[in-house]
Image (cartoon, rainbow, N blue to C red):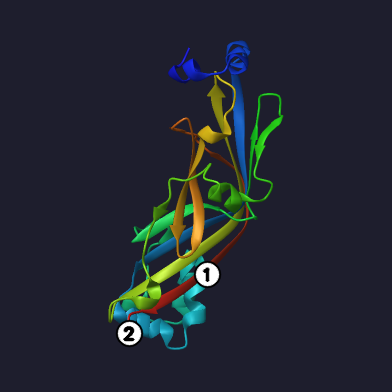
Amino acid sequence: MEQNDVDATPDELLGILSFMPETYTIEFDGVNSRIVVGDLCADAYEYWINGRVDDLLITLNPDEYEDYLDAEDEVPEYAKIFGDDYWDGLEHDIDEYGYNATNETTVIVYNEVGGVVLSTDGDVDNLISKSIVVNNTQQSLDLDSLPTGECKYKIDKFSCESHTGIFFLTRPFDPSKLKFNVIELFGEKLIDSVFYCGEEVSLELKSNIEEEHSMDIFKGA
């Protein structure tokens, strides 16, 4: 018997004692975002902002970027934002990844026989506001108000993904013990991890389709 069981009502205690240990599955399905911000030298900013902003997305694909640089051999070394490396493997000032806490993301918990014990019904943001899910981390960086002369790049990667995780319970499922770590960044809320009873639930990628990227650069006035 656990410490919390002492305060259980007779009916709750009967449910605890008669409960057979079960494996539960949590499923995430929706739009997954990765937000990356890094430093950019002023000369590179001036090069790309001068009529070449539409070419920035090419720099995210190593093959296309290589072809682009071959075709545009006047591109100076300082303008190669990621050098000869693919951006995905570099360190950045900010690199956060998670499910968008919006109606485009669904979270469902199933019991061992496939019965639904919790569903967001396409309303993750409402679930967060009810504080079943809190542990927020606020990262503050205003790209529109950078210090004078400071330059940054920002990459947004979006994909439709599905993840699942399993956790083993010896007590009946309690929704109040399910917590999401939610990161608030540039006006977005990203769910980057999930916990039950304080233990992180490991999530496994099941599918990943329809990747899209966007990229922009900023300079402090």
Tell me which label, 2 or 1, sits earlier in the chain.
Answer: 1
In the image, residue 53 sits, relative to residue 159, either above or below, namely below
Q: Amino acid at mark 2?
A: Ala
Residue at horizontal 67 percent and vertical 50 percent from the top? 122
Res 143 → quadrant: bottom left
Q: Is residue 46 visible?
A: yes
Nearer to me, 170 or 34:
170
Q: Alpha-carbon distance for marks 2 and 1?
A: 23 Å
| In this rendering, position of residue 153 left or right of residue 107 | left
The kind of residue on which mark 1 rests is: Ser
Percent x, y for residue 37? 39, 65
For mark 1, give the secondary structure. strand
Residue beneath label 2, please?
A: 221
**Residue holding disc 1:** 214
* Position of 91 relative to 153 (above/below): above
Percent coordinates x, y for residue 85 in the rendering = 38, 62
Q: In screen coordinates, is 67 left or right of 76? A: right
